[in-house]
Amino acid sequence: DKLPQHVAIIMDGNGRWAKRRGLTRIVGHQKGIKSIKDVVKTSRELGIKWLTLYAFSEENWKRPQYEIKALMNLLTRYLTTELKEMLNNGIRLLSIGQTEKLPPEVQRILWQTIEKTAHNKEMNLTLALSYGGRQEIVWAVKNMLKDMEKAT
């Protein structure tokens, strides 16, 4: 009763963490994935029904191309390797954001994983990808205008 039903995490600081330790930013992102696996597992065990991970913001597209490519590779590897875990533990994958901006192969694997986990009911894991606060405001205003049109 005391635990939240929805937890949201902004995945930020992995690159800075690695740099402070003399490691590459990519190593920091890899460590971040390991942390996320632990967070997902613990959240499910605690009975948290909704977990949202802000994994790749609109601002991340401004990073060097090699880093973007590495992040996309980490995402596809995570989705591929964790699919069995999601299926075995009733985790349903969802996504928010402008996923059409993601590379085609990443989109394909993302949507396959979403489809394969669609009937899971234990926990909802939402990945915010190519997502920004500004875009959220635009979506909110558009939805509000649609609602106003329906009301008139």
Image (tube, rainbow, N blue to C red):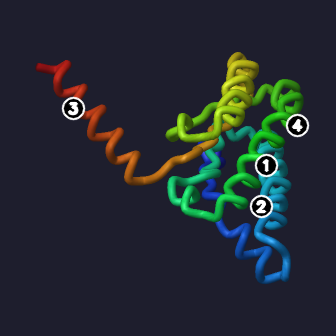
Instruction: Name the amino acid, label 1.
Output: Leu
Does residue 149 appear left or right of residue 118 in this picture? Answer: left
Q: Earlier in the sequence, mark 3 or mark 1?
A: 1
Question: Looking at the picture, how far across and down is residue 35, in whole percent?
Answer: 81, 57
Mark 1, secondary structure of its residue? helix
Q: Earlier in the sequence, mark 1 or mark 4?
A: 1
> What residue is pinned by disc 1?
74
- Around disc 3, counting alpha carbons within 10 Å, would you say few (fewer than 14), some (14 to 19), or many (20 or more)? few
Quarter that holds the C terminus: top left
Mark 2, secondary structure of its residue? helix
Q: Earlier in the sequence, mark 1 or mark 2?
A: 2
* The one of 44 and 119 positioned closer to us in this rendering: 119
Q: Is residue 122 above or below residue 69?
A: above
Instruction: Name the amino acid, label 4.
Output: Thr
Q: Measuring 79% from the left and 36% from the top, which residue is drawn there?
A: 79
Q: Earlier in the sequence, mark 3 or mark 4?
A: 4
> What residue is pinned by disc 4?
81
* The one of 100 and 96 positioned closer to us in this rendering: 100
Which numbered disc covers residue 29? Answer: 2
> What residue is pinned by disc 3?
145
Report if the CB atoms under discs 1 and 2 are less than 8 Å apart. Answer: yes
Quarter that holds the N terminus: top right
Mark 4, secondary structure of its residue? helix
Instruction: Name the amino acid, label 3.
Output: Leu
Residue farthest to the front?
65
Question: Looking at the picture, how far across and down is residue 107, in whole percent?
Answer: 65, 32
Q: Is residue 42 above or below residue 68?
A: above
Instruction: Name the amino acid, label 2.
Output: His
Whole-angstrom CA distance, mark 3 to mark 1, is 38 Å
